[in-house]
Image (cartoon, rainbow, N blue to C red):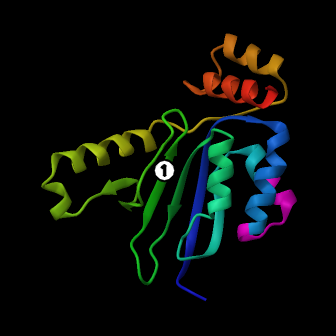
Amino acid sequence: MGDRTSCRLTLAGILDERDIPRIAETIDNAYGGPLIDLIEAITENLEPIEFEDVNYAKLDSSLSTLLEELQLSYAWEWDEGDEYLPGVLLHDACSGESSEELYRSSQDIVISVDSAHDPENIATAKRWQDFWHKGWDLVIVTSNHQMMELAAAGKLPDGYLELHQKRREKEMS
């Protein structure tokens, strides 16, 4: 057993209802379930999904791979451990970029004094801070028809409709 801490997973994007069990099973395999509670946590999406006693605060690679395959943005936050500071790992599905592990104080990204000497490091931290605080909307859709109705009503998160459509076209070919 290593250094364990609490972690939280927040999702954003457009999620097909049929993909919820895949995410829940992947989380269950990595961190434990029960599945019904995980499905409910994803479906209700009211709060981040909480995990207790995560070894070294590591995001499971199978989970991050699946979330990226499903073109979902995510924030993986962890609390302080015995051997590391609290931090966050971010993935922006719209750009396809993932951050390095970033240290945080409450809801602010922090950088070291040495890193602050480089304007590029400051710009990178600011960009990820802005992404982290932009708002996290996860819309669960049951059909393409429903998705298009939501799009017409302006109720989909910005940038994700195009990603979702490209993914569906790729799956059909």
Residue 38 within the magenta-colored segment of the rendering: yes
Q: In this picture, which residue range is highlighted in magenta?
A: 30-39
State the residue at coordinates (77%, 70%). Answer: 32
Instruction: Evaluate whether residue 150 shows in this view.
Output: yes
In the rendered image of this protein, does residue 150 appear above or below residue 78?
Answer: above
Mark 1 Cα within 10 Å, few/some/many (few <14, many 20+)?
A: many
Instruction: Evaluate whether residue 48 shows in this view.
Output: no
Residue 58 within the magenta-colored segment of the rendering: no
- Looking at this view, name the residue that lies furthest to the bottom: 1
Q: Quadrant of residue 19?
A: top right
Q: Quadrant of residue 114?
A: bottom left
Query: What residue would you read off at disc 1?
Result: 90
- Residue 51's spot in the image, x, y percent? 65, 67
> Viewed as shown, does residue 130 lie left or right of 49?
left
Q: Quadrant of residue 163?
A: top right
Q: Secondary structure at mark 1?
A: strand
Residue type at mark 1? Answer: Leu
- Residue 145's spot in the image, x, y percent? 82, 16
